[in-house]
Image (tube, grey):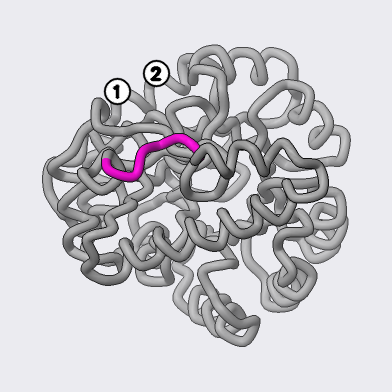
Amino acid sequence: METALTKLLGIKYPIIQAPMFLVSNVSMVKEAMHGGIAGCIPALNYRTLDELRVALRELNAAKPKGGSFGFNLIVNKSNVKYKGQLEIICEEGCDFIITSLGSPEETIRQAHKVGIKVFCDVTDLKFAKKVEGLNADAIIAVNNEAGGHRGNLSPEELTKLLSSNCNIPVISAGGVGCKADIDEMLSYGAEGVSVGSPFIASLEANVTQEYKQACVDYGAKDIVMTERISGTPCTVINTPYVQKIGTKQTWLESILNKNKKLKKWVKMIRFSIGMNATKNAATKVTYKTVWVAGPSIEHTNEILPVKEIIRKLVQ
């Protein structure tokens, strides 16, 4: 399965274990590297910069020959820790950074100084060309089957559009739960895939057994879009609690969001409430079950070690 991505990262299979808020951790990434794929963790999974530094050192010490790992950075103003996170990642070193939600220009400039590659989340051709012009090393094409915050175009449409118009590798993100899905994305012109949701139901994930079991019990038809978490449409499992609270903004939020002076504060409050609800549901038993996942959980039939999930993806 040699592709531009396997050559770029020196890995066996063209797969990145996607960075998942609250889910991804050092244990998962270690197993990913030993399984021949790359692993990635959101920097925001660490409350302090010191914790982030410890994780980087642990991963670098445990990295096998041919192993590759990275961190995901939110690069807009909403992430007040961004500059400190970037500085520590560049000091300690990793193989790649995935940027999200903002301009990657500063990240690319600083990372390239120390030999770290930068891949950028994009949902359309306009932004893909922009990050290519900033010397990004690859594009993460976030399609409409991705878990969490997703794009608007189908995997086929987005991958073909970007691969035919850009000169850097395209990594398809969303809709991959089995080997056939990987082959399909590569046939569209992708040089690799980013896979997240299938790894939620792993032994190594630090989420509740209930969250993992939900990824087994529910399928693609049970994934819905909600505006009740971050204010931006996000995919979640359609649990009874999600059905109860609804997936649309309340009438009051809708009115306040149209007020230019109040819109920013309403979004901040909604984001804070939604993230807290998501964290509680992922890390402790609660009736408020807001579990983020994508339709690729369709292929999740049992809770397995990361190495077994990788084996199922590549065989």
Three-letter residue code for mark 2: Glu
Q: Which quadrant of the structure image shows residue 247? A: top left
Residue 286: assigned label: none
Question: Regarding mark 2 in the picture, which secondary structure is present there?
Answer: helix
Label pair 1/2, CB-CB below 8 angstroms: yes
Question: The residue under label 1 is which amino acid type?
Answer: Ala
Badge 1 density bin: few <14, some 14–19, many ≥20, Cα 10 Å: few
Q: Is residue 216 above or below residue 92?
A: above
Give neighbour class at mark 2: few <14, some 14-19, many 20+ (Cα, 10 Å). some
Residue at image point 56% right, 78% down: 47
Residue at left offset 47%, top offset 53%: 38
- Left or right relative to 233: residue 36: left
* Residue 165 pos. (x, y %): 74, 15
183 left or right, relative to 303:
right
Q: Say which residue appears at 54% left-offset and 75% top-offset.
A: 46
Name the spot of residue 251 as percent of width and height, x first.
Answer: 53, 37
Residue 184 is tagged as 2
Q: Position of residue 56 (x, y in %)?
A: 57, 76
Q: Quadrant of the C terminus?
A: top left
Q: Secondary structure at mark 1?
A: helix
296 sits left or right of 265 in the view: left
* 12 vs 208: above or below: above
Pointer 1: what residue?
A: 180
Q: Is residue 191 visible?
A: no
Q: CA distance from mark 1 to mark 2?
A: 6 Å
Find the magenta span and give its range. 244-249
Whether the magenta-drawn stretch holds residue 127 is answered as: no
Taking depth in this image into account, of 286 and 197 the one nearest to the observer is 286
**Coordinates of residue 309 in the picture (x, y in percent):** 24, 48
Check the picture and name the quadrant holding the N terminus.
top left
